[in-house]
Amino acid sequence: MDIYLDANATTPVLEPAREAALAVMAQTFGNPSSVHGAGLKVRALMDEVRATARRVLDAPTGRLLFTSGATEGIQTAVLSALMHLRQRRHPPSFPTAPSPDRIRSAPPTRVLYGATEHKAVPEALAHWNSVLGLGLDIQAIPVGRDGRHDLNWLREHLDGTGLVCTMAANNETGVISDLDGIAALLRDRDLLWLVDGVQALGKLPLHLIRRRIDYAPFSGHKLYAPKGIGMLYVRDGAPFTPLLAGGGQESASRSGTENTAGIAALGAVLKALETGGTFASTQVLLGHRDRLVQALRDAFPGVIFNAPFDISLPTTLNLSVPGLSARTLLDLFDAAGIRASGGSACGAAKAQPSYVLQAMGLPHAQTASAVRLSFGPADAPEMLREACDRLRACGEALQSSCRPGDAPGASMQAPTTAASHERITRWVVDGACCYAVWDAASGHCVIIDPLPELTAPLAQWLDCRHARVAAVLDTHGHGDHASSAPQLRERLADRMLPAQDLDALGWPQSADEIVLGAMRLKRLAVPGHTADSTAYLLDDESGLCAAFVGDTVMPGALGRSDFPVSAPLSYADSLHLLLNVVGRDTLLLPGHDYDNRFATTLAIECDAQPLLDGVLSGRLAPPEFARAKAELERDLPPTQYQTIACGARAAPAGAADSVDISQDLVASALALRQTAGAARPRLIDVREAYEHQMGPLSARWPVAAEVDVEVVPLSLLLNQLDAWRSLPEETPLVFCCRSGNRSAQAARALRRLGHSQAYSLAGGLALLP
Ligand code: PLP
């Protein structure tokens, strides 16, 4: 059973609402504008729903329009208000009987909206301000740490303001606005007030009339009606301009044939609200929330709730778990069949910190790792009990997979057990890579290029493995920031193996190599990006297996050499040295990997980067190379993470290349193998250990019996790349994960390394039956 805890994004459709919609589609399907019986019947139904809505919203007067949803309601309200502000600026030449309040003030020049408003509001304001050419000053009302509007700020900005937009309750945090406080400030002011009532419908009374709210949009699908139906309340006497003109439906307020099935379904929900018995009382909802909170505290000690409970909807929990990224939590929840989202659903596809939490002034770690759990007032208590059980199971899975945490924004996870394919683990924070080289037999470990965000997660990771740390190394002294190696060493004091005379990069001066069981780490000076740039070469039983090259060579770029600490004239010689020592095909593990390419080789980079090819082939002499490189690095823009770019990127990311393969194709490839003896596809699950604990792939994959499923978590992919790229070219490798995102990264990385038969299961396991 799916546990759906994303009710603020949308809800399922209540059974009576489904039935009402079906009945309209099957029987009462007439056009409400028709004057014959079929039309009159459905018109009567619409009138009845509107009357119910007026009662439920306590809005006996004013307009009550059916819309396609809140976004349309917001557009209509904003257009109406801005048209009115325009008219005040350019009044008709012969005004007839101006109303007293119209003469009171000069035409407003400003519009205000809450900083945590749903994007539909500020985007609509900007859009109509631009379309109407008004040039209004649109400003966000700041909110406090509790998510509520700063009423002092609002008071100070009311002069000259023509429209104020404040939501009733926030969709990401559930924070309930102080609408009475705002109403008191706006009373007797010559301005308009829009209150987005989407998340309040059925949960909070809005007192539209008493508070003198001018516009209030609602959306049916947030309260068990289908998508595509909503309502807009407009106060009697508030300015109104139709958004849609045409056949004159809705008394010419909103033309277009009405969504009668949607209206009927909404009517059923409103009726249920009115008659009671379907939706739980606030008291019951508070009980559900308490139990969820307790389950979360049991599962994730240290969990932080990002909004105060006493001023939030009981149905919304916004939380962060220190040391766990939102991605990790959501992957874990999803593996447990709990559907939740990071921040708002609209923003969920973009891995960006929540602007709502940022506006509340929460620290980056909290905003970047926030997850929202939301349920609805008609959700069954059994479902919520099961949710609590599964949340606790998630906590246990995390503990027992020895996977205590990663940094917010970091993508990485850790293995459950030690094996040779778990030697190198990688973490990535905003494109910067950190590696652990770990020998399970001896328990010895080296950390390369630690990052400040990872200090706590790395310490936990090492604790979990009882690892002994032979060295914490940097590949270079950074041009733009200090290394976090000293902090990590301090934090790991009782795990550090004794070492003396560390050089500036953390290498024990007296040692030629660092031994980790059967592995050996050696260093190679490669000045260029910085004067102290060093590559670390990893040998195993079979010889050189990988080189940690820092920023000297990155996928698609060479490290920039225009820092004061750079050695641009040595760069060419360092590249030649690297080529001589590691050759063209050894895996290079970079200090930055902005496009999830994981690893590269000099051969691949020579193909992708003409400058590198020029210097290594001897066509470019070192001084020419230095000149051309300096030219390339002039005025480098920051990265997509707004961090300093570490080099000029020569090769485009290629993220658009499709690597997707459908489930049907995988199944037919398996069938083909059986009939024609074609190469057997290998299915590789790149999800992390704790996700597997929540449900192994074999239980869900329909052809599991016919295929070998290998488990290689994405964080450990580096360990397999060499083996995979030397497979016969015709062997298909199909990667899969939860949504198809991580598996596509793996497939692209492998293709770039030369294995063209690498695919990603389209849509991921989420689409499996
Ligand atoms: N306002 C709020 C507070 C919301 O939560 C949403 C939807 O998430 C909207 C407006 C937009 O609603 P719709 O997408 O149904 O038009």
Image: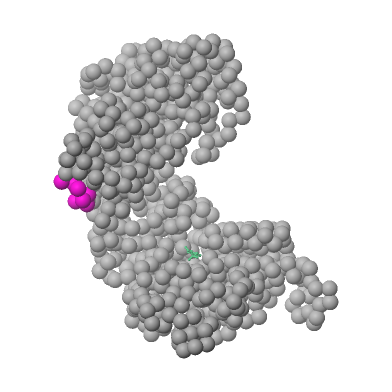
Identify which residue is drawn at 70% across, 62% down.
132
Can residue 704 be seen at all in this image of the molecule? yes
The answer to whether 438 is drawn above or below residue 508 in the figure is: below
Q: Give the x, y percent position of residue 623.
A: 57, 12
Identify which residue is drawn at 27% across, 66% down.
383
- Closest to the observer, 463 or 447: 447
**Location of residue 73 by image quarter:** bottom right
Magenta span: 698-705
Q: Is residue 629 left or right of residue 135?
A: left
Q: How is the image coloured?
A: one colour
Q: Give the x, y percent position of residue 731.
A: 25, 33
Q: Is residue 327 left or right of residue 127?
A: left
Q: Give the x, y percent position of residue 171.
A: 46, 63
What is the count of numbered marks?
A: 0
Q: Quadrant of the C terminus?
A: bottom left
- Closest to the observer, 725 or 332: 725
The answer to whether 509 is drawn above or below residue 336 in the figure is: above
- Closest to the observer, 224 or 147: 224
Identify which residue is drawn at 39% across, 11% down.
580
